[in-house]
Image (cartoon, helix red, strand yellow):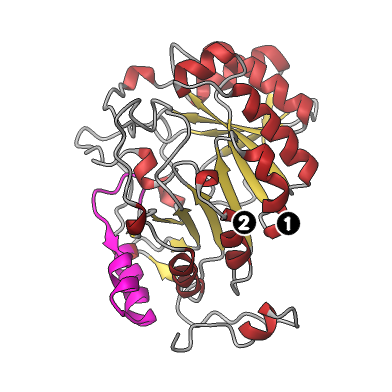
């Protein structure tokens, strides 16, 4: 691969000592000086539920399987960007656990030199069956979607049954010994207000971090309205009424999307991701690779860069690196949700990668 592999890659794969990783290329820096070291990789656009903030309910057109990147192609892409400073990976979908043999991809990516953090976002439906193998393959962190604790709420959002399977997946992940398990709850006015406090209590009781995410305009059916956004400030007020003051804590990573708080009694942490009411684009460090190999510099980007064409067209690693740099260089200052000239992407969340 023309010098892109770590010096002792073969030895490391065989179980021997791995040479210290040396970053071979200059960092991925955009025009505003934001250094990009985080990559979100969608491994599939398929899913086993139909959350209305992400997918259509019926007649979903998924990408043909031959258009989806292979594990080998994903690994090659990661090796190239790791040499440019990407050290954090998150696997997404669709629902990543519907991708066959996913632990094999986890093993491949966790062995790439320079990768320091490998996480996965899941709806949890299939997690009970796969948690142990994923953890043994090298996955260390999980984000599990849990928008409410009532079956009625779950069914209203997901348009399918499955709450009990999600809860069993959470408990299985805890038994498997993951370093960090975080719950993600999308906040939607008129639906999830009464779920805020029960979710807070559940997270506190189970020793899990909880993050609330404002409803974003990425629904496939185009029904998003500003009035449906239940803001982080409103959620915080509900939690403080129930549990007492929330104390702001310093972000361990300045580029993380969440503003974090700790309950005053020390029982747990709460984070708020407020892309609509409080955009956090100024510190963004993320790139995205869609399931069919398109590179995006923003969740709300209307432009993509075709990495699959390079990967399948006998392109060199240098050409792949140049394409990624072009993508980063073209990144805008912000997503513009709060702007009157905001243009909603044509692709929905499940087609981009959460």
Q: Secondary structure at mark 1?
A: helix
Nearest to the observer: residue 345 or residue 311: 311
Task: Work out how far the residue at label 1 is from the one at label 2, CA to CA, in angstroms.
Answer: 8 Å
Q: Residue at x 72, y 17 (%)?
A: 243
Quarter residue 208 falls in: top right
Q: Residue at x 72, y 40 (%)?
A: 173
Q: Residue at x 31, y 80 (%)?
A: 314
Q: Residues within 10 Å of mark 2 (few under 14, many from 20)?
A: many
Q: Position of residue 107 (x, y in %)?
A: 63, 64
Quarter residue 202 falls in: top right
Q: Residues within 10 Å of mark 1 (few under 14, many from 20)?
A: some
Residue lying farthest to the left in this orientation: 341
Quarter residue 60 falls in: top left
Does the magenta portion include 311? Answer: yes
Q: Residue 7 vs residue 336: left or right? A: right
Residue 185 vs 102, above or below: the answer is above
Is residue 264 in view? no
- Residue denoted by label 1: 136
Nearest to the observer: residue 350 or residue 129: 129
Task: Specify the segment rendered in magenta.
Answer: 298-327
Q: Residue 176 vs residue 35: left or right? A: right
Q: Position of residue 229 (x, y in %)?
A: 40, 22
Residue 326 vs 58, above or below: the answer is below
Q: Secondary structure at mark 2?
A: helix
Determine which of the numbered discs, if any, sits on residue 103 in the image: 2
Residue 284 vs 210, above or below: the answer is below
Q: Residue at x 48, y 58 (%)?
A: 39
Asked if the residues shown at circle 1 and circle 2 are in contact, with their CB atoms under 8 angstroms apart, the answer is: yes
């Amino acid at each position: 691969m023309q010098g892109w592999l770590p010096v002792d890659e073969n030895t490391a794969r065989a179980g021997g000592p791995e040479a210290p990783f040396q970053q071979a290329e200059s960092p991925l820096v955009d025009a505003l000086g934001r250094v990009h070291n985080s990559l979100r990789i969608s491994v599939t656009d398929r899913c086993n539920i139909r959350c209305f903030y992400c997918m259509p309910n019926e007649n979903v057109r998924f990408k043909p399987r031959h258009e989806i990147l292979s594990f080998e192609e994903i690994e090659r892409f990661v090796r190239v960007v790791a040499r440019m400073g990407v050290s954090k990976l998150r696997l997404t979908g669709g629902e990543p656990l519907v991708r066959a043999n996913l632990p094999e991809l986890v093993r491949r990516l966790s062995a790439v030199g320079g990768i320091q953090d490998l996480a996965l976002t899941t709806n949890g439906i299939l997690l009970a069956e796969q948690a142990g193998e994923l953890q043994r393959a090298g996955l260390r962190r999980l984000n599990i979607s849990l928008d409410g604790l009532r079956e009625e709420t779950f069914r209203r959002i997901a348009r399918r049954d499955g709450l009990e399977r999600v809860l069993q997946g959470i408990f299985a992940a805890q038994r498997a010994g993951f370093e960090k398990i975080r719950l993600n709850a999308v906040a939607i006015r008129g639906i999830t207000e009464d779920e805020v406090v029960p979710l807070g209590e559940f997270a506190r009781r189970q020793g899990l971090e909880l993050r609330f995410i404002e409803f974003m305009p990425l629904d496939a059916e185009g029904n998003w309205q500003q009035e449906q956004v239940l803001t982080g400030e409103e959620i915080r007020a509900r939690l403080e009424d129930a549990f007492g003051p929330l104390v702001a804590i310093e972000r361990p990573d300045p580029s993380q999307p969440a503003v974090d708080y700790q309950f005053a009694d020390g029982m747990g942490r709460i984070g708020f991701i407020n892309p609509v009411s409080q955009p956090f684009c100024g510190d963004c460090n993320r790139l995205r690779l869609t399931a069919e190999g398109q590179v995006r510099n923003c969740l709300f980007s209307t432009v993509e860069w075709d990495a699959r064409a390079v990967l399948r067209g006998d392109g060199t690693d240098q050409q792949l690196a140049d394409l990624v740099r072009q993508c980063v260089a073209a990144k805008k200052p912000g997503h513009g949700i709060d702007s009157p000239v905001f243009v909603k992407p044509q692709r929905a969340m499940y087609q981009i990668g959460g």
